[in-house]
Amino acid sequence: MKKILCVGLFAVSGAQAGGVQCVPDVSTAFTDTDNQAFSISYNALGNNVLYRQCTNMSNQTFVNTLNTCSVLANPIDGLGLNPIDRFLYGLMPTDAMGIGTHLELTFPFPAPGQPGDMMVADPVDVYRIGNDGGYQRIGSVQPPAEDVVLPPDNEQVIPIVHSAASFDPTGNLYLLGYKTNYESSADVMAGTGEVLYQVPRIMIGQVTSAALTAAAGGDIPAVWAEADTTTDATCAAVMNQFRDRTNTFSQCVVADFIANGNADQAVTDCLASTGMMDYGINDFAVSPVNGNYYALDTMSFDTTDVLIEVDSNTMQASCTNFPDPGSNTGVLTSLMFSAQNKLVAIFANENTGRWINVSNGVITTLPDAIDPYAFGDGSSLPFAVPRGPDGVTVPFRIFATGFENDLIFATGFEGTAVPPTCPAF
């Protein structure tokens, strides 16, 4: 679910085991995806649990715990369902703390003047997941390249948000990053220092369907584009608030590190005291109608939620405030679209989902209960998949020429029964 913005100062594929195919092939693809969603949850013990349900959150069923193929070093997050091969894809942080960056300090710190470039963004690992819980690491996506020319005394870091990913109808995968400049300074005589961040900029990365298909364990190329959040006043206010919260966190980390000399412990302490992991954009989704990118910020302001839309052609962001008296909307864990263009949200530790009307921002609680979890992500397949006259996905029909109206042995010995049909939502 969560990430932080360049805060702080700072692969596995298994062999076949237990009947699970740990290098997913066509037999483990999700063959029934109409109006269905998939979610993954994880806990502090590293247990990753996969569910499937309808996009209106009804009929949630357990698929598998992702622990058979190998021991996962970090949780799989950033879930997306590929409309082309119908595998799930997920992102895993490669830094130990899952914040997208690590610290490379020049000692001693504090030191005279400006310590310089201390933050290094980390890649994310990409996993392919089958419907039996089999999974395989297929490669890594590197952070975007930093700007060649920066203002004097500025450094830059662009971490990837491992909880945010989405597919478009042609099987291209999209990721989220934050481009942020920062300045560092210290006074060795006074024993003080600070790292101050400037306003972050949203980056959207695209991994083509061809690159994803060809991935074989190395770097998977991505093309990154920067969204313009400066010309919309509401968007600018959201990004300014994220900057301020990040600097509160950074000041805490610097002070803790100077006092105790342990950077990782300083990050851990300040994550707990500032709640930084709850802020920012935790997930986004591609609309099946206009192809634009949508995100929901529920935490920046106490009395409003903010719906963020980025035009996929111009990369212009527009943001709309919607009332949230008492800040009752929870901490977002995932966003996903249904085929009917309904934006569905899941929130941390809540046992209901909600859908957001992208036209007027009204948030409606869905009636069906789901398993609550503090961390995780979800994905649906909001794009039309060709199906035969009986509703069966064409490539998976027996006698695809279609002279019979039903699958032969549809619930018999040839495989697992098809899950119940989900209502359009």
Image: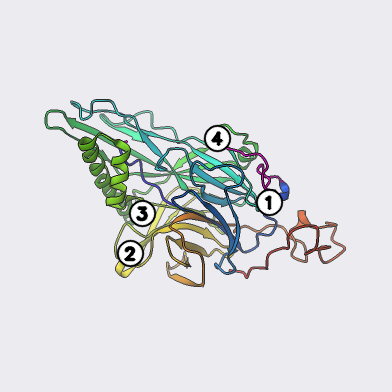
* Residue of label 4: 221
Instruction: Calculate the distance from the C-alpha at mark 1 to the C-alpha at mark 3.
Output: 33 Å
Instruction: Calculate the distance from the C-alpha at mark 4 to the C-alpha at mark 3.
Output: 29 Å
**Nearest to N terminus: mark 1 or mark 2:** 1
Quadrant showing the C terminus: bottom right
Q: Amino acid at mark 1?
A: Ala
Q: Amino acid at mark 2?
A: Thr
Q: Quadrant of residue 53?
A: bottom right
Instruction: Tell me the magenta residue range.
Output: 10-25
Q: Secondary structure at mark 2?
A: strand
Q: Secondary structure at mark 3?
A: helix
* Residue of label 3: 278
Q: Main secondary structure of the magenta part?
A: loop
Residue lying at the far left in this picture: please name it: 190
**Nearest to N terminus: mark 1 or mark 3:** 1
* Residue of label 1: 29
| Residue 213: x %, y % from top left | 65, 40
**Residue nearer the viewer, 248 or 60:** 60
Instruction: Calculate the distance from the C-alpha at mark 3 to the C-alpha at mark 2.
Output: 16 Å
**Nearest to N terminus: mark 4 or mark 3:** 4
Callouts 2 and 4 close, C-beta under 8 Å: no
> Foreground mark, 4 or 3?
3
| Residue 349: x %, y % from top left | 42, 62
**Nearest to N terminus: mark 2 or mark 4:** 4
* Residue of label 2: 304
| Residue 347: x %, y % from top left | 43, 61
In the rendered view, would you say 192 is above or below 85?
Answer: above
Which class describes the residues within 10 Å of circle 2: few (<14), some (14-19), or many (20+)?
many
Instruction: Calculate the distance from the C-alpha at mark 1 to the C-alpha at mark 2.
Output: 40 Å
Q: Quadrant of residue 35?
A: bottom right
Instruction: State the residue at coordinates (42%, 46%).
Output: 227
Instruction: State the residue at coordinates (47%, 38%).
Output: 94
